[in-house]
Amino acid sequence: MIQFERVSKIYEGGSRALSDVSFSIERGSMVFITGHSGAGKSTLLRLVMMLERASRGQVFVNGRNLSKTPDRLAPLVRQNTGMIFQDHKLLKDKTVADNVALPLMIAGLKYSDIRKRVRAALDKVGLLEKEKAWPLTLSGGEQQRVGIARAIVSMPPLLLADEPTGNLDPMLSRELFALFQHVSEQGVTVLIASHDLDLIRQMRKRVLVLSGGRLADDIPASDQVAG
Amino acid sequence: MGIVNRLRRKFRAWLRRHSYSFFSSLGVLLQHKAGTLMTVLVLGIAMFLPLSLYVTLANLEGMDLRQDEWSAVTVFFKQATDEAEVRRVAEEIQQQLDPGAVEIISPDQGMLEFRELSGFGESLDMLEENPLPWVMQVSPQQGSTDTTSERVEQITRYLQSIESVESAQFDYKWLQRLDRMMGLAKALATILTLLFGLSVVVVVANTIRLDVASRTEEIEILVLVGAGNAFVRQPFLYSGLWYGLMGGLLAIVLLQLTLLYLGRPIGLLLETYGTAFELQGLGGYNSLYLIIFGGVLGWLGAWMSVRRYLRQLQVGGYLGRR
């Protein structure tokens, strides 16, 4: 689903975010990326979402070589990728349902279909009764779940999450990861950047460890022992 | 079959995206009533100014063309000419020149008018015989001032060549002068239209620029969830369109109010010239064109603003960086 071939990313100004990173992720698997802040987790996700281009090497997502994909197709790449952010990135002046509907509006779906699918997505994250609420009236955990509903509403084959539990307590974090696992079991590839090591260990999934922009370790799911 | 269906589906999706932008942009404008009102007011006034000049010119033009006698050639016949000859000349003119109107004024009629207008009434009674000649007024066909002045010249030249005509007078210098003044005013109107049209574009561009700046967060989110440039741009372009349309509408309302307000004083003024005159407004079609024109200018202004901003949203731009 995702394949990095000797990818380096150097930002303008010379700061090196990724160096010679290679790995590949199977379709339908759930993988964590961890590492200290500044290790290159965000950059890696940004490359997958085509927010940045690799300075060297090649990035393949869903069979498409992003290094050779023109800018104008970037929206298409993003439409096929659900993205969840630490700060949720919800529109404050739109209701929960309207926020979740955004990707479908962009795809130009029929209004009645949008309604149906938005309700289904909200139901999946357990927020159906908050359909008409404003994002700012929700708790942090609820806002994050709205973000997840928005990411899965268009049923993309790939889900990315950048520090999704950053602002949540351990209980909520565990619930959130369980939700990701549920999504992954339905055939969606899930890639989560997180530094919540305890929680990651509990999940017993493959973990990519970044350090100083290099892939320091690649721990397969089977090697992890319940802690 | 497959291709047709796919195109149809794409077209429907495109249409839905547009209708979404169309209504959401209107919603945003209505949310910020005060700001929208001020922008629309500025646009309305900017469009009203050249518009009022155009309407004034159109009215002046209509006035001078509808006043037959203002552009009529006055023909004085020689003293000895009898009625039969005058009628024959009138006939000839009708056939040869196809004028708008020919009016014959007999010496008696002339005396009557002169008596009334001059106020010499009783002293005129002392005259033993009527010293006035037969007079004829020939008006050209109506047309634009340019062609009118040509026709008047042609009629005058023809009449002067007739034996029984003492003189055919027309002060076409004045008509010419009026022509040129109108030409000048029209050139001025064109310049004003260009300048104020430009100001409409600039005002909308600036408003949209601020609008875009205050909604960077929203735009960023849209792009992150997969919106293309067109989808990001559309609501702003529609905002520009709305601004222009509303500005045009306001300009027309201002114009109608002005005409209503000036109608009476202008009527009173023209009454002293003995002419009944009705102010002409813009008319339905022209009003519609103006509103559409305003919309186009607004769209253009918005496009200029948004185009510059969207360059920053390219891959590798600042988007989503914290």
Image: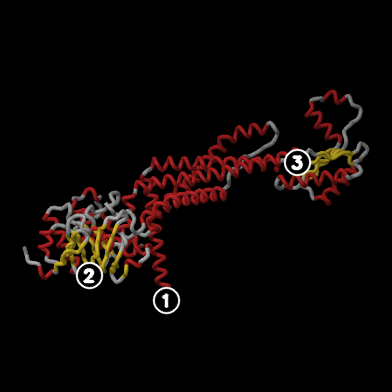
Outermost residue to the bottom: B1
Which dot marks residue B188? none
Residue sitting at 21 percent across and 65 percent down?
A190
Quarter in which the N terminus of chain B is drawn: bottom left
* Marks 1/2: CA–CA distance: 39 Å
* Marks 3/2: CA–CA distance: 91 Å
Residue B289 or A226: which is nearer the viewer? A226
Circles 1 and 2 on the same chain = no
Residue that mark 1 sits on = B1
Instruction: Work out whether B310 lies above or below B40.
Output: below
Residue B70 or A20: which is nearer the viewer? A20
Q: Earlier in the sequence, mark 1 or mark 3?
A: 1
> Element under label 3?
helix
Instruction: Work out whether A61 lies above or below B175.
Output: below
Residue that mark 2 sits on = A24
Circles 1 and 3 on the same chain = yes
- Whole-percent x, y for residue A42 in the image: 24, 58
Classify mark 1: residues with Cα within 10 Å, few (<14), some (14-19) or many (20+).
Answer: few
- Whole-percent x, y for residue B48 in the image: 53, 41
Circles 3 and 2 on the same chain = no
Which dot marks residue B71? 3
- Residue B254 placement, left or right of B69: left
**Mark 3 and 2 residues: CB-CB less than 8 Å, in contact?**
no
